[in-house]
Amino acid sequence: MTKRDLPESPIQSSKRLRTSADDTGALLQLIENAEELTHCLQSLTEWKDGISRNNGQIKTNPSFVRVREQLAGLSKKLSPIFQQLDPSQDAHHSEVKTVSDAESPVKKSQKDTGNMVACPPPPLAAWHVSEIPSQLPPLPKINDSRIEIQSFRHPGMANISRGELSYERLEWLGDAYLEAIASNLIYQSFPNLPVGKCSQIREQLIRNMTLAEYFRSYNLMQRAQIPPSVQSNLQPGKGRSADKDLVKVQADMFEAYVAAIIITNPQDGVMQASSWLRGLFSRTIKDQIVKSEITAPPIITEPKQKLAQLIGAKGVEISYEDMPTQKKHKQLNIPMFAIGVYLTGWGNSTNC
């Protein structure tokens, strides 16, 4: 019997089925992001000549910088999807070896940075009112000057040919650490809080507005490397669309700084950053921490269960439907959801 005639093993067959099922979800995610990706690629096509000539003016053009940042965000979303759609991905990583005597400065920098990545934080101590600092906690140092500079370098200032990297990769890593650390602290500090409320507190801690405020509080803007043409367009002013760009850049650099603290101190970087952020975060949600300590742990009853206890009876049917709404939370500015409750019952009166 030749190799071609061998029957397919059950393991291979089931793996192919799983991949086929996963492809549907991956393709749907691509479709959801297709419009934004197409817009970015069309914009790049318009700047093709300038990019091929390595035109410095193109790289500092505010519109080009915005498109580049959009592509960076899409890359984070879509890279795992493209890998999922590639059936040879696992074989590729196990068989292909890079043979190169001389590494480019960019590859060497990426390799050095990648080797320093630390593990997620262990369980942290819960917040307590008595431990909330009255002043900003001291800013931890970054133990590698090269990575410290990178954490403040805007993509428009990075010279790839000289091996200069922007803050983008560090920002991506720092974003993950911030979410993990905030989630860890909230989980330990609010054991009786529903998941939805925990998510709202986390959003309050790691949203761009909060991180940008931290960035400014430590006077880190004076260390930022931002192209002059972009910086001149990032002046604060009520109602300006550029305000969001400024907040986004500051938040990204703060996330990059957090990652730089961690990867340049493989032994203690995670705990050092976690301890610092524990104090910093506590100042932001002081009211919630105070309230949790003076309020007795409530007996948590699901809303549906509570309603059923109040109006439930034999012959009474309660149904729920999602209701359209465009309302947002006043403080957090996050979408709110509405549920319609319908009762089918019996009685001698139609009054409610």
Image: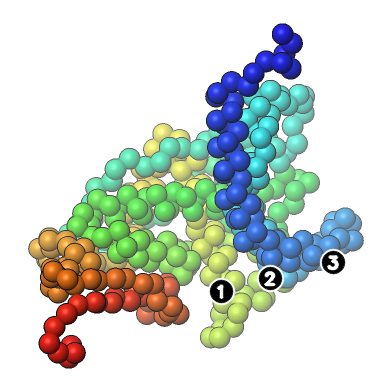
Closer to the chain start, of discs 3 and 1, is 3
Closer to the chain start, of discs 1 and 2, is 2
- The residue type indicated by label 3 comes to Glu
Instruction: Determine which residue is flagged by label 1.
Output: 244
Between circles 2 and 3, the one closer to the viewer is 3
Q: Secondary structure at mark 1?
A: helix
- The residue type indicated by label 1 comes to Lys
Q: Secondary structure at mark 2?
A: helix
Q: Secondary structure at mark 3?
A: helix
Q: Residue furthest top?
A: 1
- Whether residue 76 is visible, yes or no, is no
What separation in Å lies between label 1 and label 2 (alpha carbons)? 13 Å
Quarter holding residue 198: bottom left
Disc 3 packing (10 Å; few <14; some 14–19; many ≥20): few
Instruction: Determine which residue is flagged by label 2.
Output: 230
**Residue under the image location 23 percent in, 71 percent down:** 317
**Residue under the image location 63 percent in, 21 percent down:** 8
Left or right for 8, reference 335: right
**Residue under the image location 90 percent in, 61 percent down:** 49
- The residue type indicated by label 2 comes to Val
Picture disc at residue 46: 3
What separation in Å lies between label 2 and label 3 (alpha carbons)? 20 Å
Q: Position of residue 60 (x, y in %)?
A: 75, 65
Left or right for 165, reference 238: right
Q: Nearer the viewer, residue 35 or 43?
A: 35
Q: Nearer the viewer, residue 89 or 111?
A: 89
Is the image coloured rainbow, by chain, by secondary structure, or in one colour? rainbow
Disc 1 packing (10 Å; few <14; some 14–19; many ≥20): some
Between circles 1 and 2, the one closer to the viewer is 1
